[in-house]
Image (cartoon, rainbow, N blue to C red):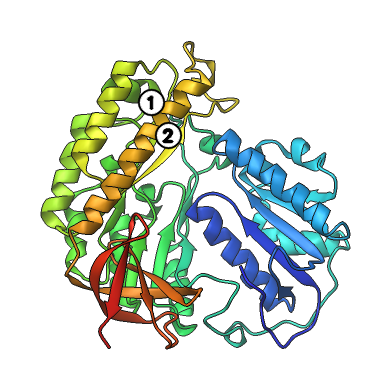
Amino acid sequence: MGRVGLIITGMNIAIETLGCKLNQAETELLARQFLKAGYRLVSATDAADIYILNTCTVTSIADAKSRHLLRLAHRQNPDAVLVATGCYAQRAPAELAQIEGVALVTGNEDKPELLQRLKESGYLENHSAVPENALGHPHPAFRTRAFIKVQEGCSSFCSYCVVPLVRVKEKSLAADRVIGEINKRIASGYREVVLTGTKIGSYNDDGVTLQGLLERILGETDIARLRLSSLQPQEITTGLLHLWRNERLCPHFHLSLQSGCGTVLKRMGRRYTTADYQRVLELIRNLVPDAAITTDVITGFPGETDAEFAESYQLCQQLAFARIHVFPYSPRSGTKAARLPDQVDHLGKKQRAQQMLTLAKSSSQNFNQRFLGRIMTVLWENQSGGLWSGLTGNYIKVYCESNKELTSQILPVKLEELYNRDRVWGQILF
């Protein structure tokens, strides 16, 4: 997040985010609240009066990153008021409160009221409100793609996952509100919206399911691109996939596999088999031929033998994912898996993760290779070092050189060659 160039004067607020797209969506909402209330958003490396960290706790590494960023913020700016919110703050508020400089810790449920909490605590001065349509777009505080929360909470309780403990109650935002938020983003100049949630496949607003919500968005908004953050394999149906006949729906499905070994899936408490997963992928590829299918894989789950890891590796190789996000298993207090015997040692988890990461790299290259020579549309997002970067609908990261302003433009691009390992170099066809 770069420095914000607003005309208004006032207190400087820095917000950083760790973790999932849901956290990113909630950070975007926070940022809009502060801007509308008359405050200035700045980079975390700038002199902020208040530094807010939206934390993640899905792994021990995420916890460590949260603590590191808070301590770093205090060292760089000892006078700043530090605020921790998000999932780590929900799970272990006392741990974060002990960090020097941290003045306020709020969980997920209190996140929407954070601005008011800061005012009541005397950390914020009052400023004149700014109309939302005066914020402008593209705005340096936000991404080129708008992240909109439609659901939160999960009651599945997979044996390894801490999320149901920190986002307890499942609830869906009203469809009318989602439509309204999307139309606001369109009015601000956004071309793509990403629907996010803890488990968006369980979306249900008084009988309106995810499929119904998508139908309404496509029918009641003019958003150029609509993307889903993540789905479970058991949530994919033929009826849902038929919606992808509309080219405004991005052909990208993130389906967490977690393990390609059936016995490990059972210990994980996942609600599908490897055969179920393979059938869903075949269905997607038949109905949405150019779709990118990306996934998450955990290595070193308790009790995972060499043979079970090999089985998982071989299935991931066979399924030819567009991207694989690899996570060495991290025990989370309060989860069933943390109490399982036969924890895999650190070295074993690390070695298996490295093998899977090598596969992930080749899988991504192979997927991108399929589209070289094709003309595809790219939403251009960022410029750095003379290069522009953007995404195709099926989530291929594309780079090009251009002296023109491309932010938020969707343009036809010829994909020419592989670039920088798992990305593609393209030529814009103006």
Image position, residue 204 (x, y; %): 38, 52
Q: Which mark is residue 130?
A: none
Q: Earlier in the sequence, mark 1 or mark 2?
A: 2
Left or right: 142 as drawn, with respect to 104: left
- The residue sitting at 58% across, 51% down in the picture is 18
Image position, residue 347 (x, y; %): 50, 22
Residue beneath disc 1:
269
| Marks 1/2: CA–CA distance | 8 Å
Q: Vertically, is 226 above or below 95?
A: below
Disc 1: CA contacts within 10 A as few (<14), some (14-19) or many (>=20): some
Total number of numbered discs in the rendering: 2
Most extreme residue toward the left is 286
Left or right: 263 as drawn, with respect to 53: left
Image position, residue 121 (x, y; %): 86, 59
Residue type marked 1: Gly
Residue beneath disc 2:
156
Q: Is residue 255 visible?
A: no
- The answer to whether mark 1 and mark 2 are in CB contact below 8 A is yes
Residue type marked 2: Ser
